[in-house]
Amino acid sequence: FSVLVKNEKLGRLVLKYWTIAFAFFSVSHIIKSLGTVKSGSILMAVANIRNIELSGHNPNVIGWTALLFLPISLAFVMTSKKQKEKIFWWLIFLIINLMIIFTFSRAAMVGMFLTFFLTIIFFKNRGIVFSILPFIMIGSMLYFIWSSAVKIGVMDTGRILSISGLSPEFFKRYDMVKTGFMIAANINENSEVKDALGFHSSYIKAWVENGFGYLCLIIFLFFYTIKTTYYVSYATKDKNIRLISISLLIAFIVAAFQAMFGITLFSAKYLQVFWVFI
């Protein structure tokens, strides 16, 4: 990538192409899901994106990858000068959100709301159109679709969007991660213990399977990307570079948080996008 892409303009073009390509994948994946049921509702069909891991794609990996593209697509809305371009990127933004919703991934859902929260914080001067309204619409859509899916029985009750529905899973994963870190420091060669600790946390997986030094490298990677994008976003005078840098900053912060509660960081499908962004 560094050899072929000589300047920021070309780098931004690569990001645009990859974001558009992911949106096309999302549309084709959703359309493909509609053919998985001969009779029944559309919601039953799209639920198969998760229920049968349609075409062999892990829905959590799709959801996490979509979270990388989510703030970038919004940044391209803001950097577009022509009205048609803005409409096009709003459409891409909507498609990526729909892909996240239809994965029915709780981790991706939390990441989406974290992305929205950070976007409101960093883009607070962009006005209500960019700061609040899109997220209220998407949030309402997510609540309606997930609630309906649980109601008709195509998703389990653990995906009800409520404090009582989500908090048990959160505390379960929190306890797993906390216990994992405590035990990882004294890990033995028992493979069963390693497999158990490596589940639901990329940081623990890195430590247990590859050593504490590898964990430090991953932490340094996130520190470097977050620090660099934050610095560029405030140091540059170029409006477009600043907006793209802020969107990358949001994507990396969310990725660092997600890595605490999942191992998708070790998925090749996710990593290829992650490294292009770096």
Image (tube, helix red, strand yellow):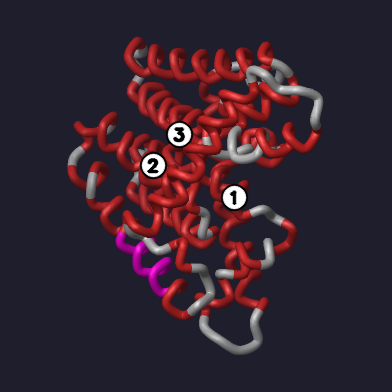
Q: Give the secondary structure at mark 1.
A: helix
Q: Which residues are magenta?
A: 140-148
Image coordinates of residue 127 in percent, x first then y, are 18, 40
Q: Which mark is residue 254?
A: 3
* Point 67% across, 22% down: residue: 207
The residue lying at 19 percent from left, 32 percent from top is 125
Q: Is residue 255 visible?
A: yes
Tag 3 secondary structure: helix
Name which of mark 3 and mark 1 comes first in the sequence.
Answer: 1
Q: Which residue is mark 2?
A: 74
Q: CA distance from mark 3 to mark 1?
A: 14 Å
Type of amino acid at the residue the image marks with label 1: Asn
Kindly indicate whether the residue at mark 3 contacts the one at mark 2 (C-beta within 8 angstroms): no
Where does the C terminus fall, quadrant-wise?
top right
- Judged left or right of residue 87, residue 136 is left
Mark closer to the observer (1, 2): 1
User: Is-magenta flag for residue 147?
Assistant: yes
Q: Is residue 254 above or below residue 242?
A: below
User: Measuring 56% from the left and 86% from the top, which residue is drawn there?
Assistant: 40
